[in-house]
Image (cartoon, grey):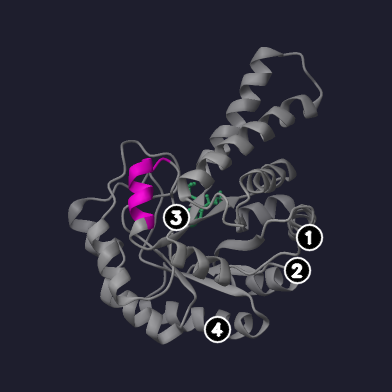
Amino acid sequence: MALVAVTELLEKAERGKYAIGAFNANNMEIVQAIVKAAELENAPVIMQASQGAIKYAGLEYITGIVRIAAENVDVPVALHLDHGTDFEQIVKCIRSGFTSVMYDGSQLPLEENIAMTNKVLEIARPIGVSVEAELGKIGGTEDDVHVDEKDALYTNPEEARHFVEKTGVESIAIAIGTAHGQYKGEPQLDFDRLVAIKKLVNIPIVLHGSSGVPDEAITKAISLGVCKINIDTNIREAFVGRMRQEMEKNPNEIDPRKLLGPAREATTEIIREKIRLFGSSGMA
Ligand code: G3H
Ligand code: 13P
Ligand code: ZN
């Protein structure tokens, strides 16, 4: 089917107490793995491309490959810009066919983040494109967060209420202890903060940096209002890990399909596992 927007998918997930997997795609094989997993699980799915992915593959290639992949399956597939920070690029993505965009103004002072998010909403909303915002700083796993820094970096519930009131944004990514990349130890999520935020903002909550978060913590986060879960690192591990295995097994192999095919299968498997964990299996 044609690409769908994210708002409706998230509203349905929120009512059903499950989460939609948002999986980062960087090449054709990963796009195919994501739609295949969604089809086998009969699940709605969000395919997302970062600015880095667009730089690597090219905007028209990303949109083209994802559109064709979606048209070949009967489950809802959305195409979302992940961590968009540049207004011009956001406009280009929308024009090229993205059905959802994230405006990441988390590095800006609160009022500037609100103003920029509103600027994006102004162009996206009239044409049915969904908008995700970010409040708080979700860094990378290399940035150790000390207890005394938590209040400065994690999402402040009162600020989240103010932000949502002033923007009317459709979903919000929050910082509660997750980080992008491979964790050194086990991430500790601040569930009290999630509960406090959810009490004050009545919109779907997005969890970034979800690779490596223990299954029980993911399930708990969903029960407390998270309904979009971003996964990239686990995909990279599965894809490159399997490719590496194949290369070690057959060091003289020169046919890329013999390496990329198994990598695509391993990626499909990890995405199926995530879809089941998130409770979105059978929800297409
Ligand atoms: O949130 C970040 C995603 O993992 C995308 O990473 O910018 O390296 O594509 P990237
Ligand atoms: P991970 O790479 O930790 O899975 O995070 C993905 C993400 O948040 C993309 O926006
Ligand atoms: Zn992210």
Q: Determine the secondary structure under disc 3.
A: loop
Q: Determine the secondary structure under disc 4.
A: helix
Label 3 packing within 10 angstroms: few (<14), some (14-19), many (20+): many
- Residue 208 got which mark? 3
Query: What predominant SS class does the magenta segment belong to?
Result: helix
Q: CA distance from mark 2 to mark 4?
A: 19 Å
Q: Is residue 27 magenta?
A: no
Q: CA distance from mark 1 to mark 2?
A: 7 Å
Q: Earlier in the sequence, mark 2 or mark 3?
A: 2
Q: Determine the secondary structure under disc 1.
A: helix
Q: Is residue 147 above or below residue 87?
A: above
- Residues drawn in magenta: 212-222
Q: CA distance from mark 4 to mark 3?
A: 23 Å
- Residue 52 got which mark? none
Tags 4 and 1 touching, CB below 8 Å:
no
Q: Kindly indicate the quadrant of the structure image that contains residue 239.
A: top right
Task: Name the residue nearer the viewer: 155 or 86.
Answer: 155
Label 1 packing within 10 angstroms: few (<14), some (14-19), many (20+): some
Tags 1 and 2 touching, CB below 8 Å:
yes
Q: Mark 1 sits on what residue?
A: 60
What residue sits 50% from the left and 53% below the top? 230
Q: Earlier in the sequence, mark 4 or mark 3?
A: 4
Q: Looking at the figure, which quarter contains the N terminus?
A: bottom right
Q: Mark 2 sits on what residue?
A: 96
Q: CA distance from mark 4 to mark 1?
A: 24 Å
Q: Determine the secondary structure under disc 2.
A: helix
Q: Earlier in the sequence, mark 3 or mark 1?
A: 1
Q: Is residue 41 above or below residue 81?
A: above
